Image (cartoon, rainbow, N blue to C red):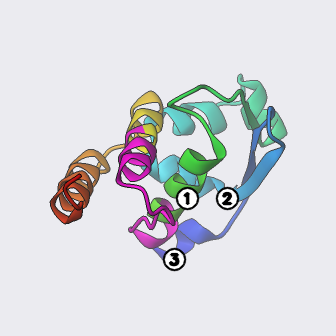
Amino acid sequence: MLPLYHGPTIKIRIKTDNTEITISRNLLCSASPVFTKMFNNGHFKESQEHVLDLEEMDGVISSRALDAFLQWLYRGTINFDIKSTEEKISATMELVRFADMYEVNGLEAKMARYIKEVLASAKPP
């Protein structure tokens, strides 16, 4: 897996809040056929510029979802630094929607287990 962390990099930017991250192209493409098509095909602007500009989309694309996605890619785990049960579930659903939009596989089951854990540990009102 180590070679996936090297090589050319891609910038992902969320234009509305000036978030910008740099990630290994190989690692990003290994997680998603959509990113593979986007960055390994010379016909797309993204593959020529090595930049993906995203518009924030409520409940799908945000800095929080992008940060969680990167955690999952690089570490295989996600740690939302959130105390509220509702916000933890909201952040998890946002990540799942982001992953679905870009056809990222392997995240849904892990996030479903995470939501179950959050609900099981929640204090009753």
Q: Residue furthest bottom?
A: 2
Q: Which residues are magenta?
A: 73-93
Write down the residue under mark 2. Answer: 23
Marks 2, 3: nearer the viewer: 2
Q: Nearer the viewer, residue 111 or 21?
A: 111
Q: Are marks 1 and 2 in contact (CB under 8 Å)?
A: yes
Q: Is residue 18 left or right of residue 47?
A: right
Q: Are marks 3 and 1 in contact (CB under 8 Å)?
A: no
Identity of the amino acid at label 1?
Leu
Write down the residue under mark 1. Answer: 70
| Kind of element beneath mark 3 | helix
Residue sitting at x 71%, y 22%: 43
Residue sitting at x 80%, y 39%: 17
Q: Which mark is residue 2?
A: 3
| Kind of element beneath mark 1 | helix
Q: CA distance from mark 3 to mark 1?
A: 16 Å
Q: Is residue 37 above or below residue 5?
A: above
Of callouts 3 and 1, the N-terminal one: 3
Q: CA distance from mark 1 to mark 2?
A: 8 Å
- Residue neighbourhood size for the residue with mark 2, other residues' Cα within 10 Å, grouped as few (<14), some (14–19), many (≥20): some
Residue sitting at x 35%, y 54%: 85
Identity of the amino acid at label 2?
Ile
Q: Is residue 9 above or below residue 55?
A: below
Q: Position of residue 47 (x, y in %)?
A: 73, 35
